[in-house]
Image (spheres, helix red, strand yellow):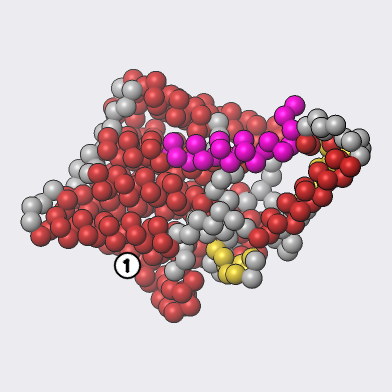
Amino acid sequence: TLPLAWTPVIYFTAAALIGGLSAVVAGRCARGMGLSVPGSFVVSAAVLILPGAGWEVPVLLTNVEWYVIAVFVVFVASWIAGYRPPIAWVAVLLVAGGLTSPLFVVSLPVIAVIAFPRRDRLDLAVVVLVACTAAVQLSASLVWGKGGGAGHWSVFEIIREYAVRVVVGSAVGARFVPRVWDALGVAGTLLLAAIILALLTAASMRAGGSTRLVGAYALYASVAYLAVAIVERPHFFAGTLPIGQVVIDHRIELWDGRYMAAPATVLIVTAVCSAEPLFRRPGAARLAAGCAAALFAAVLVVNFPVDLHHDSYAHWETQVHAQQQACSEHHGRGSVVIVYGIPTVNPSWKIRLSCRQAFGPTRS
């Protein structure tokens, strides 16, 4: 058994590699569906930044599920648009991703509808792999009885969360969402979200071709992924209404930002696809499109803060150092009890280990 002291290195390194690889795969999918380099960069940035935006822990192996879901919706959008990667490459992506996240099943109805008229080996493989991994996830949920927890959300509350956190948030960034909410109120923010969706839908319809299908998938997926998450885990969101603002470390943070990553990412993919014809126009139109893409990328980076340090974890770190010192003084004899929990947010959990299990052999 590896010592507990190795956990941060293993978790952080693996999470960083998976997050970076997800961004690379998303960029490759974006290029495969015909997007330009600037457009592909925006899509990659979305996959890299959004799962860790707001008060989240991006460099944690437990949270790589959200990077996987984000890159999955990009892959599905590119596949709908006609991207035909090698089957072996697709198999690795879908099996590894589908066994990591149970939410792949949300896209299965769209995948089946698109694949049926094509009837190609790749399309059949996509349907079978997503269906099989979804069946594994469902069977595991039934066996272990992972329930949805207490809490109930009305349809209006789900619509409000979607409009504010996903639609408006994907346009202005998580950092700016509370200001929009405070300035415009409920009705004004919902109206702004409706305008953004209307413009996005009109742009995708005008672009024509596969962009229309990508736009339709984006509208479905962006709603479905958030709605399923809220229905399955209402207790995760219940204490954060109306828009997920909580006070952590004496600061106002937007809670549960990882659940908004895939819905916001697929809307961003649609926006980039709709704007792509402008990049191919000569002269001022192309320059204006480039400036708009650069501005949007800047908004994405600045207004989706990725906080790599959280003061709430300091007390846990202090416990670990204290227990390590105790083990050293007693020459590795005895046990270690570490309690962790964020006050007022999560209940504490407790772990009991021997000194050797926790910190490895003690040096004489």
- Residue located 49% across and 27% down the image: 95
**The N terminus sits in image quarter:** top right
Q: Eyeballing the image, is 147 above or below 275?
A: above
What residue is at 21 percent from the left and 55 percent from the top? 290
Badge 1: residue crowd in 10 Å (few <14, some 14–19, many ≥20): some
Q: Quadrant of residue 238?
A: bottom right
Membership of 255 in magenta stretch: no
Image point 55% across, 63% down: which residue? 254
Determine whether, in the image, residue 345 is placed left or right of residue 327: left
Residue ranking furthest to the front? 364
Q: Is residue 183 above or below residue 338?
A: below
Q: Position of residue 102 (x, y in %)?
A: 56, 38
Residue 292 visible in the shown view: yes
Where residue 56 appears, x then y in whole percent? Answer: 57, 54
Question: Left of 222 or right of it: where is 202?
Answer: left
As for residue 13 lying within the magenta part, the answer is yes
The range drawn in magenta is 1-22
Whether residue 76 appears in this view of the structure is no
The main secondary structure of the magenta stretch is helix
Identify residue type, mark 1: Ile
Q: Tell me the residue that label 1 is attached to.
A: 195
Q: Residue at x 43, y 24 (%)?
A: 91
Image location of residue 271, percent across then percent down: 29, 53
In this rendering, would 206 be left or right of 319?
Answer: left
Which SS class for mark 1? helix
Report how many numbered discs are placed on residues in the image.
1
Q: Does residue 37 appear to the left or right of 57 in the view shown?
A: left
Q: Nearer the viewer, residue 183 or 129?
A: 183
